[in-house]
Amino acid sequence: MIEANKRLGQNFIKDDNIIRKIIDVTNNITGHSILEIGPGTGKLTRAILDKSPESLISIEKDKRFNDIHNEIMREFPQYQYLRQDALTTKLSSITDNKLIIISNLPYNIGSRLLINWLSEHNKIDKMVLMFQKEVAKRITAKVNSKNYGFLSIAVQLLCTTEYMFEVSKNCFFPAPKITSAIVKLSPYGKEITYEFYEFFKYIVRTAFQQRRKTIKKSLKPIADHIEQPLISLGIDVNKRSENITVDEFSHITEYLYNN
């Protein structure tokens, strides 16, 4: 048995029931193009392939799993195994098709991967992803809640988010110290440029760097005279960042982007 590499954030799913639940909540895999990150021992990989996707591409950084996935490729002609770094891989570089992304993501890079992919949101049909529970809570958090922040807003500008179910640490080997959770994300299909999205993330990050300050003060480093634009947009200048909706952050970004 191949031991998990802690440096790569590896924890392998050993529970077949959890794998079935992941496949079930994804829904409609047959005939679609799928991407899996960190396939490891191949249990989820085989479960996906059993649903007859048009294609499945997996990306794995750890060369120790080459033999396992070379064997799976011999069994399934629609399977492609790429040994490379998912953090530096553009979705557009691996296929022209829209992708369903299904992955038990490494804990240490999960949120970074998600934000990277959203820069190519027009390449994504939907995503069913495993995160640390606390990260999953932040992704799906609503305005005015303690978990609402940069990650919530950066994702929810572009996607619907659903907190599907939690996964006990006992469902993995080795068992992590934390609980995990599955999140389902479906892009809206908004026409948003890469440049606008980058500026949007900059605005939101700046706002949350001083979370306890009012929005008029937290955004002052970006625009010294921000108060009047906020008023003209119908935004209460005395609200804190955690009280500003995704749409309001979008309106702020649009104003500053165009002025």
Image: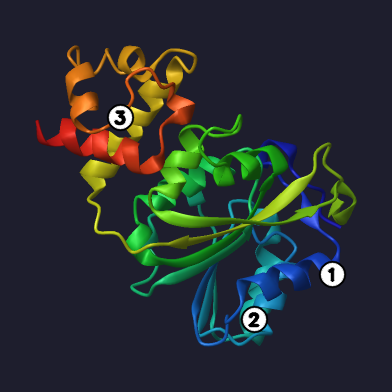
Give x and y (percent) for residue 69: 66, 70
| Label 3 or label 2, whichever comes before in sequence order | 2
Colour scheme of this structure image? rainbow
Q: Give the residue at x 49% y 38%.
A: 151
Note whether 207 is above or below 210 in the view shown.
Answer: below
| Label 1 or label 3, whichever comes before in sequence order | 1
Give x and y (percent) for residue 208: 44, 22
The secondary structure type at the circle numbered 2 is helix
Q: Give the residue at x 42% y 46%.
A: 116
Q: Give the residue at x 56% y 44%.
A: 139
| Label 1 or label 2, whichever comes before in sequence order | 1
Tag 1–tag 2 contact (CB < 8 Å): no
| Gap between marks 3 and 2 measured at Cα | 49 Å
Q: Which residue is mark 2?
A: 49
Mark 1 Cα within 10 Å, few/some/many (few <14, many 20+)? Answer: few
The outermost residue toward the left is: 259
Q: Mark 3 or 2, which is nearer the eye?
A: 3
Q: Give the residue at x 75% y 47%.
A: 180
